[in-house]
Amino acid sequence: MVDKVWSDDAATQLEATVQFRKLLSDGKNSTMIKIIRADVLPRFAEFLSRQRPPQLQMEAAWVLTNIAASDYTLLVAECGAVPRLIELLESPDANIRHQATWALGNIAADMPSCREIVLDHGAVTPLLAQFKEDMKVSVLRTATWALSNLCFGKLPAEVQVKPILEIVSLLIHSADEKILADACWALYYICDGVEGGIQDALDAGVCPQLVKLLMHASANILLPVIMSLARISAGDDTQVQVIVEQGILPCLAQLLARNYPKIIKKQACLIVSNITAGSKDQIQTSETDLKKEAAWAISNAASGGSSDQIQYLVSRGCLEPLCNVLKYQDVDLVYTCLEGLQNILEEGDIGKQRNESAMNPYAQFILENGGLDNLEDLQDFDNDAVYKLAMKLLERYWDEEVSDDANLTASKDHPAENVETVQPEDTAQPPVAASSVDGTE
């Protein structure tokens, strides 16, 4: 077969290339190694420029596509195939264009150096030209996947991002989950790896659809969507305000209350904390319903969060807004908030034991920041479930503080009417500082 590949006869070349393609279909690494050692890759790359016979380009591209999907992608990238594959993106034959797209996608998916070779040869513009209204779904899937692979990592400064986002902003409306997932990944890569990528994405108008996709049933879609939104939520106040105004908070509140993979909920917690802690003015100066939505999101995140998520939320300053939620008159919201505080305080106990500390740091923070007053006020809340959970937390974590307050209140209610002179031996001793629930003074 090797001799036939190097033949000067076009028909013989085609016959040999077809044989190599069929040989590769067994998927065995040993077969791949034999072909690599035969040093025929440059010959297949050369065939990509041959227009006669017509099928030779297709078969050569097919062979190189399969090899690029193996552990030997770099050899394909360096054998001279890339510029010729890019040229084939302009072929009048749709099947050849599809095969070339597939090969380039495999090369770009392997490693940064391979992706750089594809980008350096200017693959983006001709690839974007493949996106047409009359595309078959299978071809559109391949093109979207290849585009996503090219966007992975940091795009070179000379690559124009806006034309990519024009295509992506349309693809994220696709009903096909494969196309939709790859388009959302491409969007995340741009937001994460391109300077100014967040603003470019906002300018492309992707936010309304991204927020809607938070309600998608598939975790495969949700993950790139929520990672894109998390990246946007790490932007400046103006950028964050865009996703807030699109109604992201009520969507996150619903998402956090559902059974999704840990990584998705972690990203949701990140967005909530970025909005509430990183850009407080957006919550403090918003309308009441927006504050309530944020409260729901934080409460759900805290009540259903894992240990890592709880620690992250606390590190981002969620305790103070959670304590403020206790002032609301919404029964369901206040109860969910209490569940969140309970979860946080239990995590504080675990940390206290792990670090052999005498203090629950979260209980101490709530005490020092006025949260205890809000909890005590719930003793007058007109709901039995809220009252019982509030009392449970008060008695478990701040029993002595509550007792001290009760004693102080009682002394104010029953002031001494007369002051009597007492003997020295009857004089009260200096008061001993009341130990907190964790034993500190």
Image (tube, rainbow, N blue to C red):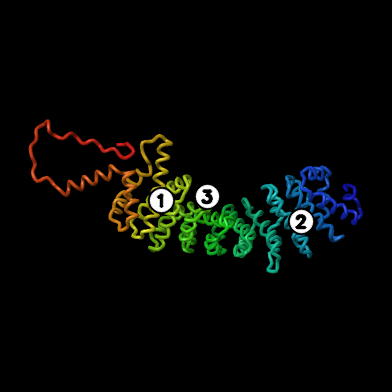
Left or right position of 424 against 191? left
The circle drawn on residue 348 is none
The front one of 201 and 264 is 264
Residue 252, percent across and down? 48, 58
Identify which residue, 232 or 328, lies in the foreground: 328
Q: Nearer the viewer, residue 52 or 365?
A: 365
Q: Quadrant of residue 311?
A: top left
Quick one: SS at disc 3?
A: helix
Comes first in the chain, label 2 or label 3: 2
Residue 81, position as x, y percentages in the image: 77, 52
Tell me which residue sits at (44%, 56%) in the image. Answer: 297
Quarter of the image for residue 132 reads bottom right
Mark on residue 85? 2
Indicate left or right for 419 with 263 as reference.
Answer: left
**Residue for badge 3:** 262
Q: CA distance from mark 2 to mark 1?
A: 55 Å
Mark 3 belongs to which amino acid?
Answer: Lys
Q: CA distance from mark 3 to mark 1?
A: 17 Å
Measured in 3D between alpha carbons, the distance from the residue under mark 2 to the one under mark 3, in whole angstroms, is 41 Å
Callout 1, which amino acid?
Gly
Q: Which residue is mark 1?
A: 340
